[in-house]
Image (tube, rainbow, N blue to C red):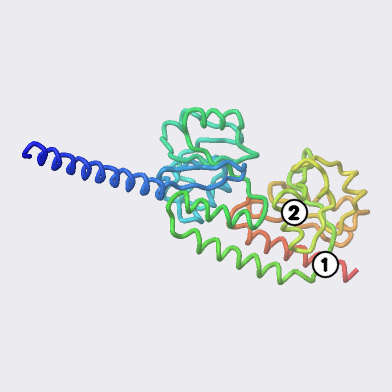
Amino acid sequence: MIHASLWKNRFGLSLVSNLVFSLISLLIFTNSAHSEITVVDDGAHTVRLTSAAKRVVSLAPHITELLYAAGAGHTVVGVSAWSDYPAEAKKLPIVADGNRLDLERIIDLQPDLVIAWKSGSNTHQIKRLKKLGLTVFESEPRSFDDIAASIERFAKLTGSHEGSRAAKVFRENHERLKQRYASKKSISIFYQIWPSPLMTLNDKHLVGEIFRLCGAVNVFGKLTPLTPSVSIEAVAKANPDAILMTDTENSGLDRWRSLTMLKASQRDNLFVINGTLVNRAGPRTIEGATQLCEKIDMARDHLQVH
């Protein structure tokens, strides 16, 4: 009887021990599952982190701006060249220039998240980073909605609580611009981003949405390349109502003024805009769109006078 009683007690304790162990294991698994962060990037890849990223490398200026807008600037440990906004970003180590990445320096920074530019970062080197076990998010915002969503995802990946508010403000400002220019008369434009070779952007780029918002039609918007090269003769044939160029060129205005047969030249519809604000798909796009819409409004006024 004594042996049987002891056996029962031991058996009972064994059951309790196993039950406790199972419950602890379940709690650990549940907590781990809840703490995992999962988002889908702009390349349709699922990106997973076991916890919020504390060390982030940005491989494009627009990514750097989006991270700061999401309240995650304190997590950024490395940036690409031309990451000049906000001012704090200029103090960070540069780990990329154009599509060339300094892999050794990136690895030395021990990032738990690398955010790459899908169409601008070196594809081969990005694959190399993934093979080395680094978590990579591919960023390619092509619309206002994409920018707002990027802010939210970057906030989620870094554990920031500021992303929702920043994205909300961005969407509200975008909606105000849409309403302001919704009924404006459409005009045709040529958008110059580089003088030699003469280059523009098609409607798949973010600027295409900005033009539509402002009530403008990009005369080369249907071309296949994202950044097509065009000829002066092609611009003359399209004969746009206005020509806008980024502030990267010094002699662009003189070139177009000399072509007096162009409507844009005849009506003094030649404008220079801040290319960083318009071409860089970041939180300041709203500011750039506001300036661009104002230039297009001026062009409308000039067309009415003539």
* Tag nearer the camera, 2 or 1: 2
Left or right relative to 191: residue 265 = right
Disc 2, SS:
helix
Left or right relative to 74: residue 270 = right
| In front of the other: 80 or 268 | 80
Residue 279 location (% of width, % of height): 67, 50
| In front of the other: 203 or 247 | 203
Instruction: Give the CA separation, mark 2 to mark 1.
Output: 19 Å
Residue 249 location (% of width, % of height): 72, 46
Note whether 212 is above or below 142 in the view shown. Answer: below
Disc 1, SS:
helix
Can you name the residue that lies furthest to the left here? Answer: 2
| In front of the other: 155 or 26 | 26
Q: Residue at x 71, y 71 (%)?
A: 179
Q: Amino acid at mark 2?
A: Gly
Quickly name the residue at label 1. Answer: 300
The image quarter in which residue 147 lies: bottom right
Quickly name the residue at label 2. Answer: 208
Residue 303 location (% of width, % of height): 87, 67
Q: Quadrant of the N terminus?
A: top left
Residue 39 location (% of width, % of height): 53, 48
Label drawn at residue 95 = none
Q: Residue at x 69, y 47 (%)?
A: 248
